[in-house]
Each structure stands twice: as C-alpha cells, then as structure tokens.
C-alpha cells in the first residue's frame, strides 16, 4: 500500500468520527479539522492553517502547551484529559501524534462520551 493510499485511509477514519477532531503540528498550527469540527466550531471553515492560540483563551492554551511538553517527556505520554463538558456530558482529550520512530510530530483534540448510556446505540439491523 502506498503512502497516499494510507493517507486516504487515515483521513477517512478521522472524517468518519462524529465528534470534532482538530489536528495541529508542533508549531501549534491547525493543519486539519474533520467535518464534525468544522460544524462544531463557529469559525471552523476559517481555522485551518491558523495558530491554535487564535481560537483559545490564555488558560486553555496554557493547558495545551503543558500537555505538549508532557508528551515530549516520554514516548508513553500520549493522552491528557483536558476538561469535561457538563452540558453534553463529554470529556475532551489532547492526544499525541507520533511518527514511526516515536517522535512527537503533532497533537490533536477529540471528545468522548463519558458514559455508555450517552452514546448512540449500536444498530445491527
């Protein structure tokens, strides 16, 4: 399988996620938003290519920077709980993106339903 084919597969996975995913490089620049993120954030269409700090307050940006610094400390440091959205009962996480050698090359944010009863039912029909 070629790199381009793999890219299509991985992009397809990210795009199929129902929750927003925002992917950033090590310069804190937003390099990709999945369709759910574009819908979730009011300025989603204008976010790609811009610095993350343009869209976050100082406190949240500080949390992101601390998370990235922790990711740099070790290859096993890959996931940080960011905050809980009580309104939607969702947890937000910041996760490391590493290359095949384990080097940190970026990070992304994603949400997860906190409880199974808040998730959509699995429909086998």
Image (cartoon, rainbow, N blue to C red):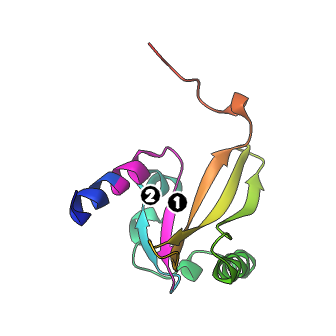
Q: Which mark is residue 38?
A: 2
Contact, CB < 8 Å: mark 1 with mark 2? yes
Residue 56, horizontal then vertical, whole percent: 63, 75
Residue 77, horizontal then vertical, whole percent: 68, 71
Magenta span of residues: 10-26
Rendered-image quadrant of the N terminus? bottom left
Residue 120, quarter of the rendered image: top right
Number of on-image labels:
2
Q: Secondary structure at mark 1?
A: loop
Q: Is residue 75 visible?
A: yes
Residue 9, horizontal then vertical, whole percent: 31, 52
Position above or below: 116 against 24: above
**Residue at horizontal 62 percent and vertical 74 percent from the top:** 75
Q: Is residue 18 a member of the stretch shown in magenta?
A: yes
Dot 1 corresponds to which residue?
41
Residue 81, quarter of the rendered image: bottom right
């Amino acid at each position: 399988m070629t790199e381009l084919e793999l890219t299509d597969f991985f992009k397809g996975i990210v795009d199929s996620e129902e929750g927003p995913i925002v992917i950033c490089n090590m310069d804190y620049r937003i390099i990709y938003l999945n369709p759910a993120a574009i819908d979730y954030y009011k300025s989603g269409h204008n976010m790609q290519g811009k610095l993350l700090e343009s869209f976050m307050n100082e406190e949240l940006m500080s949390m992101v920077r601390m998370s990235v610094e922790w990711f740099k400390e070790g290859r096993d440091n890959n996931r940080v709980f960011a905050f809980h959205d009580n309104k939607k009962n969702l947890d937000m996480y910041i996760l490391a993106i590493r290359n095949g050698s384990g080097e940190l090359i970026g990070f992304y944010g994603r949400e997860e339903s906190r409880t199974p009863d808040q998730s959509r039912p699995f429909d086998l029909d």
